[in-house]
Image (cartoon, rainbow, N blue to C red):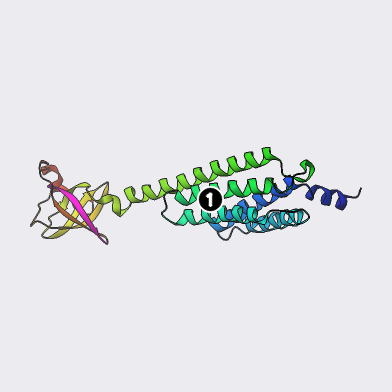
Amino acid sequence: MTIPDQLLNTLNDPTIAYLLISAGLLAIFFELASPGAIVPGVSGVIALFLGLVSLGNLDANWAGLLLMALGFVLFAIDLHAPSHGILTTGGVISFGIGSFLLERTSESPTASISRVAVVVVTAVMAAFFIFAIGAVLRTRLERVTTGTEGMRGAIGVVREPLDPTGYVFVNGELWRAQSTDGTILIGDFVRVIEVDGLTLLVTPEVGEAHDPERRIESPAA
């Protein structure tokens, strides 16, 4: 048997076809998640094409293929949409149902997809995307707590009198600030109540002691 014949014989294995389609969809997902990588997109299209060619020789359940593809579409959307993992859950369910529909394509053991392969691939895909979406959600939360949104409620000390604008030292950085409650002297503590562009809107922090040592520090410190 020649090498091309061996290759065609391998591709005619439904389990190989299923693995190629799954790998192809995953590679295309990586391309969509990080546009410009090229290699995942090209290899994914090739793997997907070979898998479809293989299943085309069988009585494949195309509804199963569409459900698998829908699962990856939901995964991709969840990377950019604030669904908090709901779309990923739907994607896992869609991929799993589609996989089992393909597994039941044929009643013949020699012309059907290995159930073990379906279970393992579905479990791996579910674990991977749950982890990936979880990482994305953690990144979004970190952006809120470390960016300008996270400045709200922070305590700072006045470095230049706010009358009504001046400078305050907050979270290790010098910020331009505007008082919402009259003049605030150097060394007084303030609380950030809002962020207006690059200016912090602050109010005197009740209960915080005056810090006279801060009077000697200039805005350029």
- Residue 164 in the magenta stretch? The answer is no
Element on which disc 1 rests: helix
Read off the residue under disc 1. 91
User: Residue at coordinates 62% horizontally, 59% vertically from top-left?
Assistant: 38
> What percent of the width, then of the height, locates residue 205?
13, 46
> What percent of the width, then of the height, locates residue 36?
58, 61
Rendered image quadrant of residue 63: bottom right
User: Residue at coordinates 17% horizontally, 54% vertically from top-left?
Assistant: 202
Query: Could one spot residue 34 in this view of the protein?
Result: no
Rendered image quadrant of residue 47: bottom right
Give the overall secondary structure of the magenta segment: strand
Query: Could one spot residue 148 in this view of the protein?
Result: yes
**Foreground of the two, 2 or 34:** 2
**Foreground of the two, 209 or 75:** 75
Q: Which residues are magenta?
A: 187-197
Q: Is residue 169 left or right of residue 130?
A: left
Q: Is residue 189 left or right of residue 76?
A: left
